[in-house]
Amino acid sequence: MTINDKKLLVYLSIKHNGDWEKIYESISKKMMDFSESEINQYENKLVSCNFITIMDDIYPASLRSISKPPFVLFYKGNISLLNKNKIGIFCSRKLSDFSKDTIKHIKKEIDICGYGVVVNGMSSGSGRIILGNYNPAIVVLGCGIDRCYPNENNDIYDNLCKNGLVLSEYAGDLEPTQDKMVHRALIMAGLSDQIIIGESHRTSASAIIASQSLMLNKNIFAIPDIENPNDFANDLLCQGAIPLVRPEQIKGEL
């Protein structure tokens, strides 16, 4: 194949709207009915963002271990944040005061340790707490890289694009879908070296992240929910997750 392989991956990713199955099929079946000029035309559309491919050295090795690792990650912001050790903090949108306080103090301890932070979106409970003060963090979108979702978080999105890191498998302003959100959860699990689960529903993204993290043999911490015995974090504690009740525990575990 004479066409640059990285250009080919970007072309297929844009052509198939980030659909992993279609990209894989095109590669495996060598469905290469296109010209280099066509590829360049697609690549020229990427004026608003940058990208890395699975072939690049900076592509996180941990992502290669998840099911369906993204062929291309489009990004805005500081790509060097991928080089840090990272802790993922995941929870639902509505949090108890105990969880809010715990996450605030956990973030301080993580900063002291020099770790990066991955959060599950700009509207999640942990996302609002961490990103609301314009702290640099990594956010993976379940929509196009150019789309701020939800719309009311434009200020946070703009700051992340400057000081943090926004990642997406999808170019342009593609709308979010359930399938995109599910695969986004897999990526967040792959990016995070260790996982913290706060208040969450059993059918939420946190459940997908925890399941994938278990398969990847990653440490999972859970913040107990004393107000709701049926919370997913409590389920994880029953399954052997590490109880996280004092932020100082973070130092000892890292």
Image (cartoon, rainbow, N blue to C red):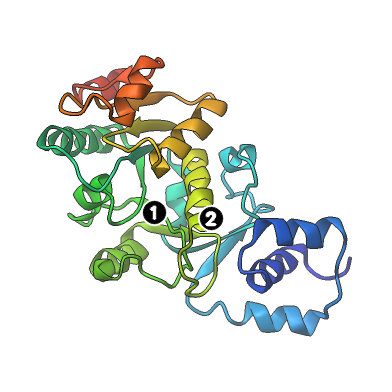
- Quarter holding the N terminus? bottom right
Query: Where does residue 92 sit, x and y in percent of width and height?
Result: 28, 44
Residue that carries the numbered disc 1 in the rendered image = 139
Q: Is residue 102 left or right of residue 113?
A: left
Q: Which mark is residue 179?
A: 2
In the shown orientation, is residue 41 left or right of residue 168?
right
Looking at the rendered structure, the kind of residue marked 1 is Val
Residue 21: where, in percent of width, then height?
70, 56
Along the line of sight, the residue nearer the viewer: 139 or 205: 205
- Mark 2: amino acid: Asp
Residue, x 52% and y 57% (percent of image)? 180
Question: Is residue 152 found left or right of 160 in the rendered image?
Answer: left
Identify which residue is drawn at 80% across, 79% down: 36
Badge 2: residue crowd in 10 Å (few <14, some 14–19, many ≥20): few
Q: Which mark is residue 169?
A: none
Quadrant in which residue 84 is drawn: top left
On screen, 103 above or below 149?
Answer: above
Q: Is residue 82 above or below residue 51?
A: above
For this orientation, the residue located farthest to the left is 97
- Relative depth, front residue between 228 and 182: 228
Is residue 254 visible to the viewer in this orientation of the structure? Answer: no
